[in-house]
């Protein structure tokens, strides 16, 4: 087993290695932060399928589902194993830690590593539901963020882009130099061209979510009352041009339209429902790639402090609504809104005021930069309280067995 001392090496917000002990402690901390716990006998509990279970909102959905709703079932992600001097991806280590929590809680959760867009994975999941979980699926959470998707029918590979629609967008964003000194920098992103919108919708819209439902329904695996949720984001007017009104926003609109179609169909066939869950802001590996989001999130934390609602608490609320522990009240577009704390008028007014005042010289007093930088490092298992980073750690952590 390979053991070594790991130090954070990175290029911007992208880290080259991940820390196994830090990732494990992070998952344990999420478990502790999730309120309440389901009291169900071992071997019981609803059967759930979580897509994109190793990172961000999908990880929060998995941890909250285990603790709050007592789920069992299948979690799917796509991660890289340790190789030579490189560690595994952070999601690999987080998955191993989540599997440990599931076992300790007496929950039968199977972790699969592979391409969620492929029909091979859909077949593998369907067979597991049939053979291991009694042929009935109760819930599906779809949280897949990927740069590319290959259509299994045509073999065409689509690539998503982060671009505004109609005209170029100029915004401020937050960067850090090698010494961690912050800079507020103006960046311009050119508009979508050609089939950029269609390509992004093909990757990040509702096509694969609907394909999963088709596949599982075709094999008779959707239980009576089956419910499914796909994850979405609206965000602030400050970031709307590059996000909600851009190519990613077009994909989210397609996702939400898909939810309405699926909701009508599931209600008719199994008495079920489909919704999108609009979550609040968080520092994730996906969000740090969006121009302006780093600055916005740091300023939001500067306004709200500890009143920011972490993803695992957001998903405790979502699971309560999906399982009937709390009323499920969608908005007029059929969306479950978990972002009210972020988009409250007074909060957005305060963030907008700080946004206008933010420069390289003033940003440290307006945004919680220490918190933001630590959150980025924690995505890779660094800067997690309670971890001894001077100690050697085993990096050859195996993928959870069945």
Image (cartoon, rainbow, N blue to C red):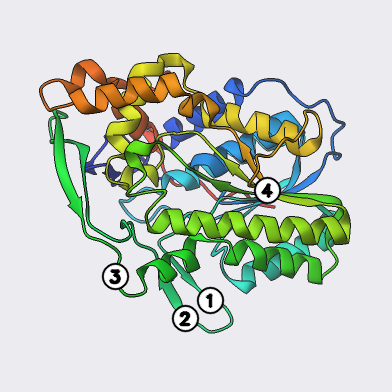
Contact, CB < 8 Å: mark 4 with mark 1? no
How far separated are the C-alphas under marks 1 and 3? 22 Å
Give the structural element (helix, strand or loop) at label 4: strand
Q: Residue at x 43, y 72 (%)?
A: 158
Q: Nearer the viewer, residue 28 or 344?
A: 344
Sequence order check: which comes first, mark 1 or mark 3? Answer: 1
- Disc 4 or disc 2, which is closer to the eye? 4
Sequence-earlier tag: 4 or 2: 2
Secondary structure beneath dot 2 equals: loop
According to the picture, the residue beneath numbered tag 4 turns out to be 275
Q: CA distance from mark 3 to mark 4?
A: 31 Å
Between discs 4 and 1, the one toward the N terminus: 1
- Distance from the alpha carbon under mark 1 to that under mark 2: 5 Å
Residue 18: x percent and y percent?
37, 41
- Is the residue under label 2 in contact with that under label 3 (CB below 8 Å)? no
**Camera-nearest label, 4 or 1:** 4
Q: Quadrant of residue 369?
A: top left
Q: Which mark is residue 156?
A: 2
The residue tagged 1 is 151
Instruction: Residue at 17%, 29% (x, y): give it.
Output: 180
Q: Secondary structure at mark 3?
A: loop
Query: Label 3 vs label 2: CA separation?
Result: 19 Å
Question: Contact (CB < 8 A) between labels 3 and 4?
Answer: no
Residue where numbered disc 3 is placed = 193
Q: Secondary structure at mark 1?
A: loop
* Of marks 3 and 2, the one in the foreground: 3
Q: Label 4 to label 2, Cα distance in Å? A: 28 Å
Pointer 3: residues within 10 angstroms few (<14), some, or many (20+)? Answer: few
């Amino acid at each position: 087993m390979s053991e070594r001392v790991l130090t954070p090496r990175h290029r911007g917000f992208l880290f080259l290695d991940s820390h196994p002990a830090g990732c494990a402690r992070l998952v344990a901390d999420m478990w502790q932060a999730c309120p309440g716990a389901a009291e169900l006998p071992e071997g019981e509990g609803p059967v759930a399928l979580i897509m994109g279970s190793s990172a961000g909102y999908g990880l929060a959905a998995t941890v909250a589902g285990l603790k709050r709703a007592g789920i069992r079932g299948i979690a799917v992600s796509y991660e890289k194993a340790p190789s030579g001097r490189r560690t595994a991806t952070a999601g690999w280590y987080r998955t191993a830690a989540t599997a440990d929590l599931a076992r300790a809680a007496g929950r039968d959760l199977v972790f699969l590593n592979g391409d969620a867009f492929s029909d091979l994975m859909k077949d593998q999941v369907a067979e597991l539901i049939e053979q291991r979980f009694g042929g009935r699926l109760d819930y599906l959470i779809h949280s897949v963020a990927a740069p590319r998707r290959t259509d299994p029918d045509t073999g065409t590979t689509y690539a998503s882009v982060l671009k505004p629609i109609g005209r170029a967008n100029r915004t401020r964003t937050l960067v850090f130099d090698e010494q961690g000194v912050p800079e507020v920098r103006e960046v311009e992103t050119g508009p979508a061209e050609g089939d950029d919108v269609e390509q992004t919708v093909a990757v990040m819209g509702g096509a694969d979510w609907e394909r999963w439902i088709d596949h599982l329904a075709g094999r008779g695996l959707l239980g009576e009352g089956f419910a499914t949720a796909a994850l979405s984001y609206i965000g602030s007017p400050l970031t709307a041009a590059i996000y909600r009104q851009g190519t990613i926003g077009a994909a989210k609109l397609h996702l939400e339209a898909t939810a309405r179609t699926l909701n009508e169909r599931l209600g008719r066939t199994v008495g079920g429902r489909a919704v999108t869950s609009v979550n609040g802001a968080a520092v994730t590996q996906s969000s740090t790639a969006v121009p302006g989001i780093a600055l916005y999130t740091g300023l939001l934390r500067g306004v709200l402090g500890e009143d920011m609602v972490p993803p695992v608490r957001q998903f405790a609320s979502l699971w309560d609504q999906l399982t009937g522990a709390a009323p499920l009240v969608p908005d007029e577009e059929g969306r479950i809104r978990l972002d009210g704390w972020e988009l409250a008028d007074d909060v957005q007014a305060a963030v907008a005021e700080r946004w206008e005042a933010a420069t390289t010289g003033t940003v440290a007093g307006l945004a919680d930069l220490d918190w933001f930088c630590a959150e980025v490092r924690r995505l890779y298992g660094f800067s997690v309280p309670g971890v001894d980073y001077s100690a050697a750690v085993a990096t050859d952590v195996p993928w959870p067995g069945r």
